[in-house]
């Protein structure tokens, strides 16, 4: 840890010694707690379990985390109970990709160093017109998704997103969303397309835990019992009247040269899969590898 005065926020910042990344700020109370526990072995680790893994699956868990790091990069969790106006919610998700482990928004400044942000910094982060940025900022603060501390630094409301460990109860209503893919989708899109991209948020409650398929029974693991949503049903959720146009727009979305959406067909019908590098609910390494590879398939010329 190195000293870094940030007003009332903290006196110390945690630094990843391998990457140099700032992981978040500590309060004096937290520092005292760390000092008091320095020689004590923490025995309550099992109370906080990132992905609901069985304690006997440590090896599988390690492999899963390695694959997450390889395929998906950094991630945060989104608690999606409250679906808001679509173009604004996608911009909110994009802003969250700059969130640190204390839920503060950091934005790269000169020489690659990160800094805490004020409202004015959102103009640069969002890259929209002044009118669109003002409307977005006002909406996100009015709805309580973004908040300011006493120094005017912007935080993400922890009720909606959190980076890092979460409780088992939070895991039931959360989903991993990955920074690199969200940023790529945002930066490749125009402001008028943010409404369409917010579809990824609206579909979260329908994402199957094992196959990342959009269905009406997302907790079902037996593929023969999964009830996939049709393209028309998904289009209705997204507010599209023309399901054929909607299907084409979905299949045109790409992330790092891979498909963002994949449609497969079995005897039970067509399945719509979301690329797990956008978001993923499952915990199985083999499932993750399979889904990532499926999204890399390309049509033969």
Image (cartoon, rainbow, N blue to C red):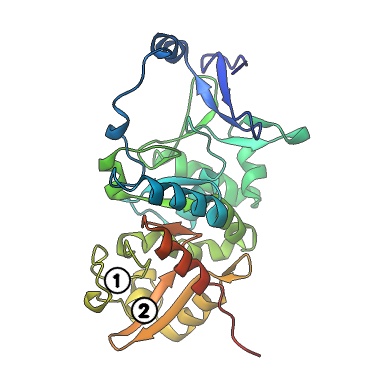
In the displayed structure image, the side of residue 144 where residue 248 appears, left or right: right
Q: Quadrant of the C terminus?
A: bottom right
- At label 1, counting other C-alpha atoms closer than 10 Å, the crowd grade (few under 14, some 14-19, many 20 or more) is many
In the displayed structure image, the side of residue 110 where residue 143 appears, left or right: left
Q: Which residue does the image show at 55% across and 13% down from the upper left? A: 11
Task: Residue 8 in the image: state x and y as whole percent.
Answer: 51, 14
Q: Earlier in the sequence, mark 1 or mark 2?
A: 1
Q: Quadrant of the N terminus?
A: top right
Label ID, residue 215 = 1
Disc 1 to disc 2: CB gap under 8 Å: yes
Q: Which residue does the image show at 70% across and 32% down from the upper left? A: 113
Label ID, residue 193 = none
Residue placed farthest to the right in the image? 111
Task: Calculate the distance from the C-alpha at mark 1 to the C-alpha at mark 2.
Answer: 8 Å
In the displayed structure image, the side of residue 202 where residue 124 appears, left or right: right
Report the residue marked by disc 2: 271
In the displayed structure image, the side of residue 11 where residue 46 appears, left or right: left
- Front residue of 133 and 172: 172
Q: Is residue 120 visible?
A: no
Task: Residue 170 in the image: state x and y as whole percent.
Answer: 30, 42
- Front residue of 129 and 182: 182
- Front residue of 107 and 84: 107
Instruction: Give the answer, above or below, for where 82 lies relative to 230.
Output: above
């Amino acid at each position: 840890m190195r000293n870094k005065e940030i007003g009332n926020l903290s006196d110390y910042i945690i630094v990843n010694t391998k990457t140099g990344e700032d992981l978040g700020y500590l309060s004096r109370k937290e520092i005292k707690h760390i000092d008091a526990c320095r020689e004590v072995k923490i025995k309550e680790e099992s109370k906080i379990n990132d992905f609901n893994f069985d304690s006997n699956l440590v090896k599988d868990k390690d492999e899963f985390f390695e694959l997450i790091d390889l395929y998906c990069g950094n991630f945060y969790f989104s608690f999606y109970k409250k679906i808001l106006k679509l173009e604004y919610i996608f911009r909110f998700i994009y802003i969250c990709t700059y969130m640190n482990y204390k839920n503060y928004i950091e934005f790269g400044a000169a020489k690659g160093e990160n800094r805490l942000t004020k409202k004015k910094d959102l103009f640069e982060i969002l890259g929209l017109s002044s009118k669109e940025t003002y409307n977005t900022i006002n909406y996100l603060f009015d709805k309580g998704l973004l908040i300011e501390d006493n120094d005017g630094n912007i935080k993400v409301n922890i009720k909606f997103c959190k980076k890092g460990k979460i409780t088992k109860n939070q895991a039931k209503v959360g989903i991993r969303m990955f920074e690199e893919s969200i940023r790529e989708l945002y930066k490749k899109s125009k402001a008028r397309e943010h409404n369409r991209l917010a579809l990824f948020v609206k579909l979260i409650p329908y994402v199957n835990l094992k196959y990342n398929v959009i269905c009406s029974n997302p907790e079902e693991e037996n593929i023969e019992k999964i009830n996939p949503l049709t393209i028309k049903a998904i289009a209705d959720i997204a507010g599209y009247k023309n399901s054929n146009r909607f299907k084409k727009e979905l299949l045109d979305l790409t992330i790092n040269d891979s498909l963002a959406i994949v449609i497969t067909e079995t005897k039970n019908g067509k399945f719509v899969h979301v690329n797990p590098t956008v978001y993923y609910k499952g915990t199985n390494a083999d499932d993750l590898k399979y889904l990532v590879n499926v999204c890399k398939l390309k049509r033969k010329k």
